[in-house]
């Protein structure tokens, strides 16, 4: 019977008193062997790194320095460091306030500078409390209130062991028998990226080039040196903590092993940057991600209005919108982002002509960009008739389009109806209709105008 219980008893003895008796081991970023970051556009990043560790004694405290202060501990995974007994994120950082809190009720040296002479005097006091920018101290048998400003300062005897200048990760495990790299992966706030495009039109305005830069942001409190980056395009839903942890740890494993060209990942798009780079704390870094030399582009002018069965005697004047459209014929899906468009003037100098945003766009999908309002085109419309019939209204409209430019332009006119409608007459043929909308394509010659007149029956909704 003794032989049967000797091993568990020995193990129990090992896990009791000696378990936490070994000196803590501190590992900083210099032991890092590999670092990969997957960055999302929603103030979220996935960090996966490996660091060289020596053989660990059972229960030995291992302090991993240089980790994000926004580390989400519920997503932390440690591999290769033995069976984990506990893990902690130490964010009790060194500051003047944390030092004062630590020394509450203890004796400190208090120094005071004489503003007039500049001389300084020191004396022993007991720190009683801190409130805002004042402290209460006991000197001899008296209690004094002192301001926390440049003329008064406390002299602290030593730095408390539990306060550190940077956040750290601490864990204990059952130990390991030999030196080996350990892998740490976790989600963190403070990382994000955005996409910015520069679209350049050629002289004809029918071809364009597209350059896309990814801007990475780091506010985690630490530097990421010589890291491999992957950028996830798409909107992530962040569910309950447990399923969030499982889903993203699986994502960590898959993302770290991928590389090369952009690839579809689940319902998102994963971009792997070709070269390792560093992203320092509070740094914004721009890296090229998309480059397309020549794509056909179409300029369109659009205007729309709502036709309602109510009297309107005003003559409405407005400028139509200018749109650019193209098909993403590149091999790379386009992440959503801001697009700024430039075009050459008569002297060949590029001028900014408008900006917009695009959504995440797969290969082969159409992209439409609103640039602004046309300067040379103007639209005037007026209701010329409104009469009540038995179960409907009869309405007539006149739309006048002027073109003061030196080139002919095509206007896409859309008229929206809020109730069932029937076109009775139009001076120009309707291009098409869909549901509650009618479309006309109006040719407007240079230095000229064109007029559209139409009559429509608007049926009253059935009660």
Image: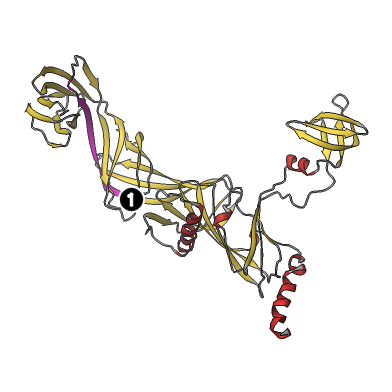
Q: Residue at x 27, y 33 (%)?
A: 322
The residue most toward the front is 1
In the image, taking residue 9 as reference, residue 270 lies left or right, namely left
The residue most toward the right is 140
Vertical placement of residue 17 versus 10, above or below: above
Q: Position of residue 46 (x, y in %)?
A: 51, 55
The number of discs equals 1
Q: Image quadrant of residue 110?
A: top right
Query: Main SS of the magenta segment?
Result: strand
- Graded by Cα atoms within 10 Å as few (under 14), some (14 to 19) or many (20 or more), the crowding at tag 1 reads some
Q: Image quadrant of residue 399?
A: top left
Q: Position of residue 405 (x, y in %)?
A: 21, 26
Q: Residue at x 59, y 69 (%)?
A: 80
Residue under circle 1? 292
Vertical placement of residue 322 versus 187, above or below: above
Q: Position of residue 1 (x, y in %)?
A: 71, 85
In the image, taking residue 389 as reference, residue 178 lies left or right, namely right
Q: Residue at x 27, y 49 (%)?
A: 365
Q: Residue at x 78, y 40 (%)?
A: 100
Please check the rendered image and state whether residue 293 is part of the magenta-colored stretch, yes or no: yes
In the image, taking residue 138 as reference, residue 400 lies left or right, namely left
Vertical placement of residue 276 versus 182, above or below: above
Q: Image quadrant of residue 173?
A: bottom right
In the image, taking residue 133 as reference, residue 241 lies left or right, namely left
* Mark 1: secondary structure: strand
Q: Position of residue 38 (x, y in %)?
A: 48, 55
Closest to the observer: 37 or 104? 104
Q: The C terminus appears in which quarter of the rendering?
A: top left
Closest to the observer: 442 or 59? 59
Task: Point out the stretch of residues depicted in magenta.
Answer: 291-310
Closest to the observer: 456 or 199? 456
Identify the coloring. secondary structure
């Amino acid at each position: 019977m003794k032989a049967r219980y000797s091993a568990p008893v020995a193990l129990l003895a090992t896990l009791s008193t000696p378990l936490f008796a070994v000196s803590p081991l501190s590992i900083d970023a210099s032991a890092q062997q590999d670092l990969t970051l997957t960055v999302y556009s929603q103030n979220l990043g996935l960090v996966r790194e490996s660091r060289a560790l020596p053989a660990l004694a059972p229960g030995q405290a291992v302090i991993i320095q240089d980790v994000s202060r926004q580390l989400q501990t519920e997503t932390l995974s440690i591999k290769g460091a033995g069976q984990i007994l506990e893990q902690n994120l130490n964010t009790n950082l060194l500051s003047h306030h944390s030092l004062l809190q630590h020394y509450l009720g203890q004796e400190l040296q208090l120094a005071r500078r004489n503003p007039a002479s500049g001389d300084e005097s020191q004396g022993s006091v007991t720190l009683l409390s801190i409130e805002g920018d004042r402290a209460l101290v006991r000197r001899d048998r008296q209690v004094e209130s002192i301001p926390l400003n440049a003329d008064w300062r406390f002299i602290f005897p030593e730095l408390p062991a539990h306060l550190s200048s940077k956040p750290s990760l601490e864990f204990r495990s059952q130990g390991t028998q030999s030196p080996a790299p350990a892998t740490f992966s976790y989600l963190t706030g403070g990382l994000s990226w955005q996409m910015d495009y520069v679209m350049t039109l050629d002289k004809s305005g029918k071809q364009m080039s597209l350059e896309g830069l990814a801007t990475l942001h780091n506010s985690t409190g630490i530097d990421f040196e010589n890291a491999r980056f992957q950028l996830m395009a798409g909107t992530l839903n962040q569910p309950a903590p447990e399923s969030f942890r499982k889903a993203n740890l699986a994502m960590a494993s898959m993302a770290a092993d991928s590389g090369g060209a952009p690839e579809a990942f689940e319902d998102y798009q994963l971009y792997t940057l070709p070269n390792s780079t560093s992203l320092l704390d509070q740094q914004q870094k721009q890296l090229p991600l998309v480059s397309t030399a020549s794509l056909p582009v179409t300029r369109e002018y659009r205007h729309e209005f709502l036709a309602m069965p109510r009297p309107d005697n005003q003559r409405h004047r407005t400028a139509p919108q200018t749109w650019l459209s193209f098909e993403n014929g590149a091999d790379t899906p386009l992440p959503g982002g801001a697009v700024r468009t430039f075009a050459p003037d008569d002297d060949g100098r590029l001028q900014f002509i408008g900006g917009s945003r695009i959504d995440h766009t797969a290969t082969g999908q159409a992209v439409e960009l609103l640039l602004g309002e046309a300067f040379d085109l103007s639209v005037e419309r007026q209701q010329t008739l409104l009469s009540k019939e038995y179960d409907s209204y009869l309405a007539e409209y006149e739309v006048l389009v002027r073109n003061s430019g030196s080139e002919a332009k095509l206007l896409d006119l859309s008229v929206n109806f809020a109730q069932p409608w029937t076109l009775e007459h139009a001076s120009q043929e309707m291009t098409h209709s869909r549901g509650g909308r009618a479309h006309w394509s109006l040719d407007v010659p240079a230095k000229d105008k064109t007029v559209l007149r139409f009559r429509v029956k608007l049926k009253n909704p059935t009660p």
